[in-house]
Each structure stands twice: as C-alpha cells, then as structure tokens.
Amino acid sequence: MRGMLADFRNGLLTENPVLRLVLGLCPALAVSTALMNGFWMGVAVTFVLTASNLLISLIRGFIPSRVRIPCFIVVIATFVTVVDLSMNAFLPEMHKILGIFVPLIVVNCIILARAEAFASRRPALNAVADGLGMGLGFTVALMLVSAVREFLGTANLVVGSTPLFGDGLPFAPAKVMTLPPGAFITLGLAVALLNVLTRKPPAARAHGAREEVSA
C-alpha cells in the first residue's frame, strides 16, 4: 500500500508530467484557453492513462519484446476511441472545442512513456496508482494554466456554464493571454514558480551530496 501511495503522489509534484517532465505540452498549450477545456482534457487523459496502464500491466507477460511498442499503441488507441466517442455522445460542445486533440491522445508522450517505463514493468495496482497520479497531476497543471489564461484574457472564469464574476471584473483583459504567446508565458512562469517553491536550500543540497558520496 505504501508503494502504491508513493506511485500516486509521484505524478502530482515530484514528476508532474507538465511542470516537471515537460511532457504533453501540445494540449497544455493548445486547449488551455478556458478552465473547463483544461478540466475535460485532463479527465480524458487520466482515463486513457489509467486504463491503458492497467491493461498493459496485466498483459505484459504475453507481449513479445520486439512488438511491445505497437501493442502499447493499440491498447492506448482503443481507450482513446472510447473517450472520443463518449465525449462526442455526451459532451458534443466540448468535443468540438477540444477537436483533434482528443484523438491525438494516442501519441501523447505521457501515456506512451508511462506504458514503457512503468506499466510494462510493475504490478497492476501500482500501474493504476501511477496512472491516476500522473493523470491528476496533468489535470491540475492544465487547469492551472487554463485558469490563469482565461482570467487574465477575459477578466472572468466560467465553471460549467456559469461565469463566476458575472459580467467580468473591472480591468482590461490582456488578449495576448488567449493567444499562443500567452500559453508559453503562463506555462513558463508556472514551471519557474514550482522550481522556486520546491528548491532545496544550499545546506540541504550539500548534505544530500555528502550522503551520496558516503554511500
């Protein structure tokens, strides 16, 4: 159980796929113009990541090493199809907004990387914990970037279909935040902020280095 919790927490901060590993940047930059866009893209990726991790872990003993990557892609593509069709049926407006980026989950670096580096080598429950942690970490990072861009770019935040600030706050929106440069600026500042907040003081880094040398 402790190992599963560690695998789950790993994706939230230590190896956050967007803010630490800098993976999956296409959706993080392209669809993060609104909070709800980031939320539903995160949900889609989390489902595909968790389900594919589970299935790959269960069948890893039957997959020849020579064809493991094609097999992983087939598994991932199956769950992406489920998400794509389900979103089209139940959330058609969001499906139109996210557009091609839902099918492109198939080639999302996060999912294939976790399949190869983790799910194909670990038990099923650990693979599920890793998928949930990585997916949640991706979702939180995407929602953070989306919320900042939407708030600064429109002077409002929309949750569901409800604007949180009515007609908007009384400041001039920075339209650049709704454009591609705003995505790069916001993501870069988020990565820098996380690095500053989690940076160890020099004394702690020196102590860790001495422990590694003595070991």
Image (tube, rainbow, N blue to C red):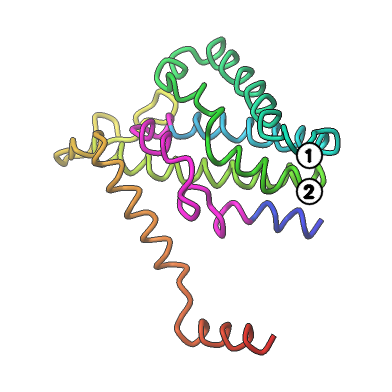
- Farthest residue, direction left: 172
Residue found at x 60% / y 35%: 46
Residue 8 drawn at (x, y percent) = 68, 51
Residue found at x 51% / y 82%: 205
Residue 213 located within the stretch drawn in magenta = no
User: What is the total number of numbered labels drawn onto the structure image?
Assistant: 2
Vertical position of residue 66 compared to residue 21: above or below: above
Which stretch is magenta?
A: 10-37
Q: Which residue is mark 1?
A: 57
Residue 60 drawn at (x, y percent) = 80, 38
Instruction: Specify the quadrant of the image occupied by residue 179.
Output: top left
Instruction: Look at label 1 and name its amino acid.
Output: Ser
Residue 36 located within the stretch drawn in magenta = yes
Residue found at x 44% / y 26%: 160
Mark 2 or 1 closer to N-term? 1
The residue carrying pointer 1 sits among few (fewer than 14), some (14 to 19) or many (20 or more) residues within 10 Å by Cα, namely many
Residue found at x 33% / y 33%: 33
Vertical position of residue 144 compared to residue 15: above or below: above
Q: Which mark is residue 122?
A: 2
Residue 175 drawn at (x, y percent) = 18, 35
